[in-house]
């Protein structure tokens, strides 16, 4: 099961193909080649990457 690399919550909702939303800390997650990519949704609807806040091993999925 997918958990948020930011808050470790499992309260994750699916919003698209390989796209998820953490209902605990309100960040968007996407999966690509076994890595979780994290994004903050800005006021204008654009996404800002938060990947630099996490080590690659924290962002691994499905291993």
Image (tube, rainbow, N blue to C red):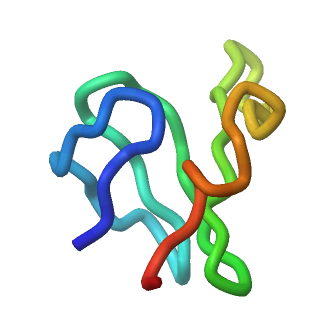
Classify 48 as above or below 30. Answer: above
In front here: 33 or 18?
Answer: 33
Q: Residue at position x 33%, y 28% from top?
A: 7
| Left or right, 61 with reference to 32 | left
Q: Residue at position x 24%, y 27% from top?
A: 24
The N terminus sits in image quarter: bottom left
| Left or right, 3 with reference to 60 | left
Give the quarter of the image for residue 13: bottom left
Give the quarter of the image for residue 37: bottom right
Where residue 41 sits: x, y (%)? Answer: 64, 28
In front here: 19 or 1?
Answer: 1
Classify 19 as above or below 6. Answer: below
Q: Residue at position x 29%, y 38% from top?
A: 8
Q: Residue at position x 26%, y 53% from top?
A: 12
Give the quarter of the image for residue 48: top right
Where residue 51 sits: x, y (%)? Answer: 76, 39
Where residue 27 sits: x, y (%)? Answer: 50, 33
Classify 42 as above or below 32. Answer: above
Where residue 6 sits: x, y (%)? Answer: 45, 30
In front here: 42 or 39?
Answer: 39
In front here: 23 or 54?
Answer: 54
Looking at this rendering, what residue extends furthest in the top direction? 43
């Amino acid at each position: 099961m997918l958990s948020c690399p930011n808050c470790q919550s499992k309260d994750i909702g699916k919003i698209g193909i390989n796209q998820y939303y953490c209902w605990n800390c309100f960040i968007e997650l996407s999966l690509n080649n076994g890595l979780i990519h994290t994004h903050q949704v800005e006021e204008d609807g654009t996404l800002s990457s938060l990947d630099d806040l996490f080590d690659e091993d924290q962002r691994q999925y499905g291993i």
